[in-house]
Amino acid sequence: MKKITHTLCALTAVVGLSACATPTETFAPSSLRNAVQVAESIERLELYTRPDGLELSARDKLAVAQFLDGYARSGDGPLYVNRPVNALSGLGTQQAESVIRGLMAQGGLNSNAVQTGQYASRPGAPAPVVVSYRALRALPQDCRAMGSLTDTYSNQSRAGFGCFQSANLAAMITDPRQLLEPYAQGQPNAQRRQVIYDKYIQGETTAAAINPDQRIEIDN
């Protein structure tokens, strides 16, 4: 009987050890698993001109103004204006560049940021003046692959946990450069800094004074 007892205890210990040694899948933190990706995109606007001049409707001018506003908010680098080779001397292409520079001046943009160029085009074929700039975009995660929500035997968070939070954050970011490097620190208020320093030297509290009318009451 004693021998059987020892055998059962040994089997129990072996089973217990094997259960503890069972590997479980672990995941990286959600901030790393669903990090917001930043990618470069090319924003492009095409202006079709005529040899005898450029005619822009009010809607066309609004479209150009909105395009330049997007450049002001998220443009990275110069504004490129590329003209077709077969229309370099045309009045329409020259007016297109003039209109762009004029709208930039109205919007407070530096027209020196414009870089002009040319591209090959077939003679007689309609070819637009191409205005473009580079911009950074925050790319949201693809959360369609959710995985099994009932697979919780290992008490681990599922692989897609936090994906929607990351996707919503990417949709709200207006300047993806914030994810690459922080904004430069502004100049501190020298006058306020000196006031705090004087209080510190005199042994006074440097905290802001609390308004006596500011209080919290809890009714049970």
Image (cartoon, rainbow, N blue to C red):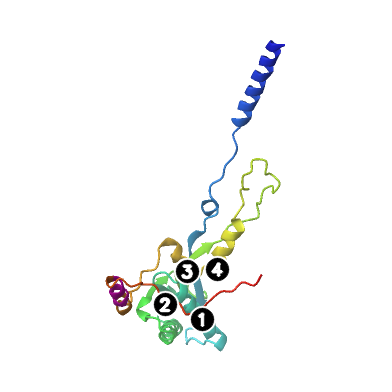
| 169 with respect to 12 (left or right) | left
- Tag in front: 3 or 2: 2
Q: Amino acid at mark 1?
A: Asp
User: Pointer 3 and pointer 4: residues touching (CB < 8 Å)?
Assistant: no
Residue for badge 2: 209
Residue 130 seen in the figure: no
User: Could you tell me which secondary element the residue under label 2 belongs to?
Assistant: loop
- Tag in front: 4 or 1: 1
| 182 with respect to 28 (left or right) | left
Residue 213 marker: 1
Q: CA distance from mark 2 to mark 4?
A: 36 Å
Q: Which residues are magenta?
A: 194-200
Q: Amino acid at mark 4?
A: Met
Circle nearer the N terminus (2, 4): 4
Within 10 Å of the Cα at label 4, are there few (<14), some (14-19), or many (20+) other Cα atoms?
few
Quarter occupied by residue 210 = bottom left
Residue 132's place in the image compared with 160, above or below, is below
Q: Amino acid at mark 2?
A: Ala
Residue 108 screen position, x and y as percent: 41, 84
Residue 1's place in the image compared with 205, above or below, is above
Q: CA distance from mark 4 to mark 1?
A: 38 Å
Residue 164 seen in the figure: yes
Identify the residue at image location x=52%, y=58%.
36
